[in-house]
Image (tube, rainbow, N blue to C red):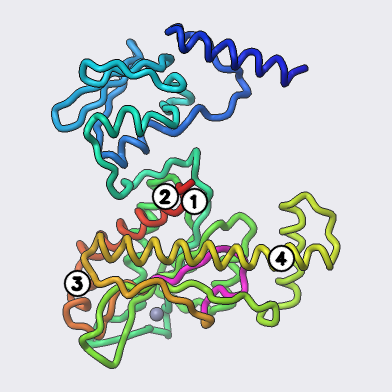
Amino acid sequence: MTVRLLKATAGLCLMLFVSGCATVPLPVSAPLPGISLNSVCDRYNVAWQFDGVTQVVLLEYKGAMAKALVGSPVVLVGKEKVILSAPLRRRQGIIYVPEDFESRVLAPFGGTPGRRGLIADMSVSKIRTIVIDPGHGGKDPGASVTGTKEKNVVLDIAKRLRGLLEGAGFKVIMTRARDEFVSLAERTAVASRPEVDLFVSIHANSNPSAKTRGVEAYYVRTVDKKDLDEDQRRMNEKAFAKNLNMEYSPLLAGIVAQMMYDHKIYESRKLAEEIAGGVSRDVGAPNRGARASRFFVVRNTVTPAVLVETGFLTNAQEEQKLNSGGYRQRMAEAITRSIIDYATAL
Ligand SMILES: [Zn+2]
């Protein structure tokens, strides 16, 4: 009964929208009406303004203007009238546009999609909580050349990354926020917390050849059950069973767990490719690619995880860059963009 009523209401709304009347409110329980205007304009480099009194949204791109009205599906692009599949909506201060806003307004308007900006559209993000793991620390300096210590370089990048990711809308947990030794077991324990959606470890590289330079991102190649601690494995399997609303049974949970491990590898690889490509492009360093590794700090967890090698301290040029705050900021911004791209790709 309720379903039929909702369907009837939706049909009525659609008819009214098509005929130009757009003041019918959505049912209170309706899902989020589309994607946020801010994130989509950010990606197309289109500036926008909203007037709370008139409810008019003004878009601007290279001197060209477009006008839309919250509650209406009609957009004036220059002098051209475009009728969208649904009206613009404003909920809790956020303006939402329908799916076809991008292809029917922003693209004809002249905007071109670039790398996403530094604000995530949390309404579509599959990631909420991210662990940032600055490699090494304390008695373990990591790669160390001519006074530059990996542990210090990666901590600074990680702190910048934390600020940017929090600003973008994510919750961030750090495995260390100062110069201290953190064991692999402790890092894994943080990554295994139930609320964690993603694990990103930050490192700087070294190589016997001083010529070697560039960005690499590692993902776990296999998740072998033999590697897993027995308690950890049972905990993972119970969590999977719960996620799928299944009663826990060792056999069924084991099968589901294997699927989830496969999924972890798949997701980790996707993110590693995104980071290696995106970061090398953004900071202008060679892309040494997404690489599979079995020797991985978080092999024992099921959270998708990557390890970013931000550059080679054994290469004089990259060492000099990694010693500059400006370059470390660009590095952190590039990693943030890649994570946002990954987290909000549908
Ligand atoms: Zn390292």
* Mark 4 / mark 1, whichever is N-terminal: 1
What is the distance, in whole Å, between disc 2 and disc 3 at their CAs? 25 Å
Q: Residue at x 30, y 81 (%)?
A: 149
Residue under pointer 4: 257
Determine if the magenta segment contains residue 209.
no
Q: Is mark 3 within 8 Å of ligand 1?
A: no
Principal secondary structure, stretch drawn in magenta: loop
Residue under pointer 2: 166
* Up-down relation of residue 26 to residue 35 (above or below): above
Q: Which mark is residue 15?
A: none
Determine if the magenta segment contains residue 306.
yes
- Seen in the image, is 344 located left or right of residue 328? right
**Circle 2 or circle 3, nearest the eye:** 3
Q: Which residues are magenta?
A: 296-308
What is the distance, in whole Å, between disc 2 and disc 4 at their CAs? 31 Å
* Mark 3 / mark 4, whichever is N-terminal: 4
Question: Mark 3: which amino acid?
Answer: Lys
